[in-house]
Amino acid sequence: MAVKLHRCSNMWLKIGPCWKVEKALRGMGIEYEAVGGPARLGKREFLAENTGQRLYPAIQFEDGSWYREESKDMERRRFAPAG
């Protein structure tokens, strides 16, 4: 899997910032694994450790690096698929 999309656990919900970024990844043809995480901000230590924020969505690349911005900026960014 090229990237992991860390997002809210309400993956069935097709609105909001997490869905915007997921839809953008699909539109770019990028393979990803959606990883649902805790709903409560206080339970998102792993996000804070890796992105400096406790907000979804965040992308973890295959090399272990992370990317997090506002969803509107994330959905506009173009990612090159690994390979």
Image (cartoon, helix red, strand yellow):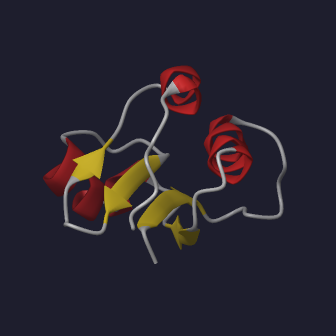
Q: Residue at x 41, y 48 (%)?
A: 58
Horizontal side, residue 25 vs residue 81: left or right:
right
Q: Position of residue 63 (x, y in %)?
A: 20, 66
Residue at (61, 41) in percent of width and height? 21
Tell me the quadrant of the picture where the C terminus can be found.
bottom left
Q: Is residue 37 above or below residue 80?
A: below
Foreground residue among 80 and 54: 80
Q: Viewed as shown, does residue 45 lie left or right of 55?
A: left
Residue drawn at (69%, 37%) of the image: 20
In the image, taking residue 81 as reference, residue 7 lies left or right, namely right
Q: In the picture shown, does residue 34 fall above or below 81?
A: below
Q: Examine the image and state in which quarter residue 51 appears.
A: top left
Q: Given the current orientation, which residue lies at the most extreme bottom position?
A: 1
The one nearer the camera, 16 or 62, is 62
Residue positioned 81% across, 40% down in the render: 15
Residue 50 pos. (x, y %): 18, 54
**Position of 78 relative to 51 (above/below):** above
